[in-house]
Image (cartoon, rainbow, N blue to C red):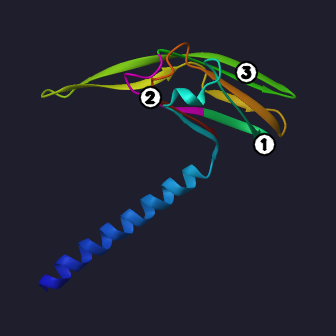
């Protein structure tokens, strides 16, 4: 009986972990662009630039910033039939738990975009002078 008590919860935990890893993999398959900007050598004249292909559809910007990330992040997308520009502002949200305080960080701005047709897109990311502040930028299918 004692073995059943240990085996059943262990099997359930393994099942939950496998299912959660599958969910993460499905979410990561929707990434059409990713860059982690943490090295000044990634910038040319203060701007990061790259080109990628994107299908027709709706997309969402996702960021992984911290308190040292650029205070503003200007992103331009240019394509044959598409132009987008947004100046994202870093915002810290204070969380108080009673025994501690901490901040979470995100960028405010228009995070949803709609691409009318499949095309090559050039992305330009300008950290507005803060090339040392680390931030990851993703564009994911919405």
Q: Is residue 6 left or right of residue 39?
A: left
Q: Secondary structure at mark 3?
A: strand
Mark 3 / mark 1, whichever is N-terminal: 1
Find disc 1 in the rendering and name its residue: 55
Q: Which residues are magenta?
A: 61-70
Question: Could you tell me how far apart the alpha carbons at marks 2 and 1 are, in whole angstroms?
Answer: 27 Å
Residues 83 and 131: in front is: 131
Q: Residue furthest front?
A: 41
Label 3 close to label 1 by CB (< 8 Å): no
| Residue marked by disc 2 | 65
Q: Is residue 60 magenta?
A: no
Q: Closer to us: mark 2 or mark 1?
A: 2
Please tell me in which quadrant of the rendered image residue 79 appears: top right
Residue 51 vertical placement versus 95 (above, below): below
Question: Could you classify mark 1 by the number of other residues whose Cα lies within 10 Å: few (under 14), some (14-19), or many (20 or more)?
Answer: some
Q: Are marks 2 and 1 in contact (CB under 8 Å)?
A: no
* Secondary structure type for disc 2: loop
Up-down relation of residue 31 to residue 42 (above or below): below
What's the residue at 25%, 26% (across, down)?
102
Task: Using the numbered discs, state the Cα–Cα distance from disc 3 to disc 1 in whole angstroms.
Answer: 16 Å
Is 105 left or right of 5, judged from the image as shown? Answer: right
Return the disc, 2 or 1, that comes first in the chain's sequence: 1
- View extreme (right): residue: 80
Residue at position x 46%, y 28% from top?
134
């Amino acid at each position: 009986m004692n073995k059943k008590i240990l085996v059943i919860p262990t099997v359930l935990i393994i099942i939950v972990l496998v299912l959660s890893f599958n969910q993460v993999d499905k979410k990561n398959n929707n990434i059409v662009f990713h860059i982690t900007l943490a090295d000044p050598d990634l910038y040319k004249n203060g701007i990061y630039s790259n080109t990628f292909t994107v299908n027709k559809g709706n997309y969402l910007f996702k960021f992984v910033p911290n308190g040292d990330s650029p205070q503003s992040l200007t992103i331009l997308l240019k394509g044959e039939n598409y132009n987008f520009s947004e100046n994202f502002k870093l915002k810290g949200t204070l969380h108080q738990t009673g025994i501690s305080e901490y901040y979470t960080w995100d960028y405010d701005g228009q995070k949803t975009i709609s691409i009318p047709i499949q095309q090559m897109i050039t992305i330009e990311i300008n950290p507005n002078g803060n090339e040392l502040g680390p931030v990851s930028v993703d564009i994911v299918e919405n």
